[in-house]
Structures are given as structure tokens and as C-alpha cells.
Amino acid sequence: PVCRLRVSGEVPARLREGPLILAVNHISPVDPMVMTAACRRARLTPRFMATGGVFRAPVVGAVMRRCGHIRVDRKSADAARVLPDAVAALRAGSVVMVYPEGRIGLDPWMWPERGKTGVARMAALSGAPVVPVAQWNTHQVLPYAAPKGLATSLLKAMWRRPVVRVGFGQPVDLSGLSGTAGAQAMRA
């Protein structure tokens, strides 16, 4: 009801069941809903890595826990524990979706922020390929400033129904990194 979704690119059928890491840019609070719809069209069922605040929400948190999504408590002592949880999910054959920037980008021109090392570390530890995913125009549905102006933004989006694009890229195999000195040092 708030946008017109256009999905391009295709994840190879052999990778759809996992293990697979989806590395997605993050530009709006509505990104997870858009990615859920895009993944449904791509016949993927990812486990989202999401901030701990979402898991504390009364209804949404219960749904996230029940669906097996992975909680990330940034800026806490438990933050480092998420990497083994994600690697275990990948080794069990899951598709894991992660925002490499770790948060919604704050650049006014929507340039991505510097990515964290988590995606490469997850790939090195699990051997899972990475599919880069680009999404654009979700900021037209709900800008970063939300919840400020939430109702106005959603009403405008319902009226205009902006085109939101999601593009699945070609898989990137990072398993060759596991034998490098840096990867071995990280594992140690």
C-alpha cells in the first residue's frame, strides 16, 4: 500500500536454501519490510540480524524471537556474541540477512556508511557466499527522521506510491579468504 516494489537480479536456486549471506544497504526504517517482500519474490527466507531494540518491542519482538531472527545488541558486552550465533545459523543452512553498515546511513545524499567487518568474518568462518543487495527509494516511503513525521510520511507514500527498487547481485565467494594470514589471525 505504500510503494511499488521492483525486484531485479536473481539468487541462484542452489543458494536459496543456504547457507547464504545477504548484505543489504540500509537507508530507511521501512527497509526490513521491503526486504521481506523482495525476499519473498526471490523465494528466500532469511533470518534477519536486527538491533536488540526491535526484540524488546511487545508484539514485534515476540514475532522476531519466534521466527528465529538474530538479535544484535550494539554497544553492549553481548555484541560480540552475535557472530558465533550467525555463523551457527549459516552452518545449519540458513540464509542470514545483514546490514553491513550496522545502522541506517546518515548521509543526506544517501551514500552508504563504511561497512563493518562482520559480513567478511561470517563468510570466512562459515564458508557461505555473500550476495550483495541494493535497495533504493525506501527513504521516500519513510525517511530516517521517523518516527518524527511518521503519519505524514506514510500518508504521502500511500498517495504517491513511490517505486522502490531492490537488486540482487551476483554471489561473491569469500571462502578463499579463510586461508589468508588475516583470516587465520582473526580465527585465533
Image (cartoon, rainbow, N blue to C red):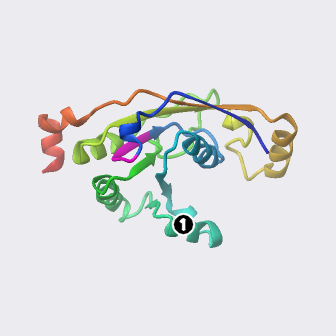
Give left or right: position of 28 versus 15. Answer: right
Which quadrant of the figure has residue 87?
bottom left
Residue 162, given in percent of the width and then of the height, sits at: 77, 32
Q: Residue furthest front?
A: 13
Residue 64, given in percent of the width and then of the height, sits at: 54, 64
Question: Please, what is the three-letter code of the amino acid marked with disc 1?
Answer: Phe
Which quadrant of the figure has residue 173?
top left
Name the one closer to the observer, 45 or 131: 45
Q: Is residue 51 above or below residue 167?
A: below
Q: Is residue 20 magenta?
A: yes
Q: Is residue 169 above or below residue 127?
A: above
The structure residue drawn at horizontal position 47% and vertical position 46%, both measured from the top left corner, is 102
**Magenta segment:** 17-22
Residue 34, given in percent of the width and then of the height, sits at: 63, 43
The secondary element bearing badge 1 is classed as helix
The structure residue drawn at horizontal position 41% and vertical position 49%, both measured from the top left corner, is 96
Give left or right: position of 3 versus 68. Answer: right
**Circle 1 residue:** 55
Residue 148, given in percent of the width and then of the height, sits at: 77, 51
